Amino acid sequence: MEKSVAKRFELIVFDWDGTLMDSAAAIVAAIQQSCRDLAITPPSDEQARHIIGLGLRDALRSVLPGLDPARYGEVAERYRHHYLLHDHELALFEGAYELIESLTKAGFLLAVATGKGRHGLDRALGSSGLQQHFRATRCADECQSKPHPQMLLELMEEFAVAPGKTLMIGDTTHDLLMARNAHVPALAVAYGAHPRALLEAETPLWCAENVTEMHAWLMANA
């Protein structure tokens, strides 16, 4: 599936959770259980899914706005505990490995911009077998959290690629807003954390229903 025509994009940047790895349900469960541990009313599934993609502290501030800020550290510690209990069970979405392999063979520069911390992303990259395919990565404990454009701005600067030659791919409005703030086109995926209607309201180039559709769109349009 290698491309022989001129590429529209040079750099393709992927979100991780909910875009390449099927982890949204595990994140929601870990957030809710961490609240129960501390006798805090847990957010609903919808509320917890909405903050996926943000850095952990920003996510907790958003989903637990009435909580004493001094307690966010407690919740973050419990969240990490519960997530790490199950992260070894998580898998890539069907077709994700083949997609990344095809894009590498086609000559695209690939990168990750994620709300995960560095330790968590490195662990996930290693367990998924995708580490060698990504030329650079940015995490929320190294940069401003989405939707701030810092992650994309740093990646474009690192590879000397213009915004118009860069594509951001993600499953949340946080990803799409980060792309907009960096003046970068975006592709949405509707199988992750945020519903299709919210994603389409941010006018991405397209919204894929599954990895197979995303793969076909990229091979035809990227």
Image (cartoon, rainbow, N blue to C red):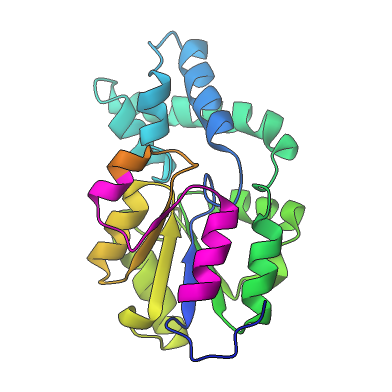
| Residue under the point 44% across and 54% down | 170
Going by the image, does 67 lie left or right of 195? left
Determine if residue 145 is in view. no
Determine if residue 28 is in view. yes
- 96 within the magenta span: no
Foreground of the two, 215 or 25: 215
Quarter of the N terminus within the rendering: bottom right
- The number of callouts visible is 0
- 221 within the magenta span: yes
Q: Give x and y (percent) for residue 139.
A: 48, 57
Q: In which quarter of the image is residue 216?
A: bottom right
184 vs 45: above or below: below
Q: In which quarter of the image is residue 168?
A: bottom left
| Residue under the point 60% across and 55% down | 212
Q: Give x and y (percent) for residue 46.
A: 38, 25
| Residue under the point 48% across and 25% down | 31
Q: Give x and y (percent) for residue 137.
A: 53, 66
Q: Give x and y (percent) for residue 79.
A: 53, 29
**Residues in magenta, as a range:** 199-222
Going by the image, does 26 lie left or right of 43? right
Q: Residue furthest top?
A: 39
| Residue under the point 39% across and 65% down | 151
